Image: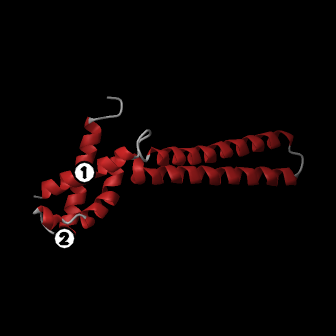
Amino acid sequence: MIIIQIIIISLLVFAIHYTMLPGEIFGFIDKWWQKHEDDYFNEADRLNGLADELELTATNRYDAAEIDYKRRDADALIKKANFLDKLSQPLFRCPVCMAPWYGTALYWVIPWPRLWLPAHDWVHWLIVIICTLGLNSIVVRLFKEDD
C-alpha cells in the first residue's frame, strides 16, 4: 500500500512541476523569476564595470571608497540572484527538490483512508517522502531533458 502512496505523490509532484514549465499554465512564474535573476546579475555586471572604470581613473581616497561601495553592492546583488536560483529549485524547477515540500503538503492533505490506504502517521510520512525523493530522482535520470 505504501508504494501506491509513493507513486501518487510522485506523479502529483511531477504534475505540479510540469504546470510551471515555460509555455504551460503557470509558466509565467519561471519567466518572471528568471527575469528578476537576470536583472540582479546585469546590475551587478554594470556596477562592476563602473568600479573597473573608476579604478583606472582613481585619484583620491573618495574614489577608492566609491569603488569599494560599488563592489559591495555588486556582490550583494550576485548573492540575491544566487539565492533566488537556489530557492527556485524546490519551488518549481526541480521535481526531486520539490518532493519533500509539495510531497509533505500532499501527504497530509490527501484523505488516504478514503482511498483505502493507511492513515496519516509520522513514521509513515517520513518513509513515503524519502521514497518519493528516490522515485523522482530515478525518473528524472531516466527521462533527461535532452531526450
- Compared across the picture, whether 97 is left or right of 37 comes to left
What is the basis of the colouring in this image?
A: secondary structure
- Under mark 1, the amino acid is Ser
The residue that mark 2 highlights is 121
User: Where does the image place residue 5, in percent across and percent down from the top left?
Assistant: 17, 57
- Under mark 2, the amino acid is Asp
Q: Quadrant of the N terminus?
A: bottom left
The mark nearer the N terminus, 2 or 1, is 1
- Compared across the picture, whether 101 is left or right of 88 comes to left
Q: Residue at x 26, y 47 (%)?
A: 136
User: Where does the image place residue 23, in percent across and percent down from the top left?
Assistant: 43, 38
User: Where does the image place residue 62, in percent across and percent down from the top left?
Assistant: 86, 54
Q: CA distance from mark 2 to mark 1?
A: 18 Å
Label 2: few (<14), some (14–19) or many (≥20) C-alpha neighbours in 10 Å: few
Q: Residue at x 67, y 42 (%)?
A: 45
User: Where does the image place residue 33, in percent across and percent down from the top left?
Assistant: 52, 48
The residue that mark 1 highlights is 10
Q: Residue at x 40, y 53 (%)?
A: 90
Q: Residue at x 13, y 54 (%)?
A: 3
Between residue 117 and residue 132, name the one nearer to us: 117
Q: Secondary structure at mark 2?
A: loop
Q: Quadrant of the C terminus?
A: top left
Does 139 sit above or below residue 13? above
Q: Secondary structure at mark 1?
A: helix
- Compared across the picture, whether 126 is left or right of 50 comes to left
Between residue 62 and residue 35, name the one nearer to us: 35
Dot 2 and dot 1 residues touching (CB under 8 Å): no
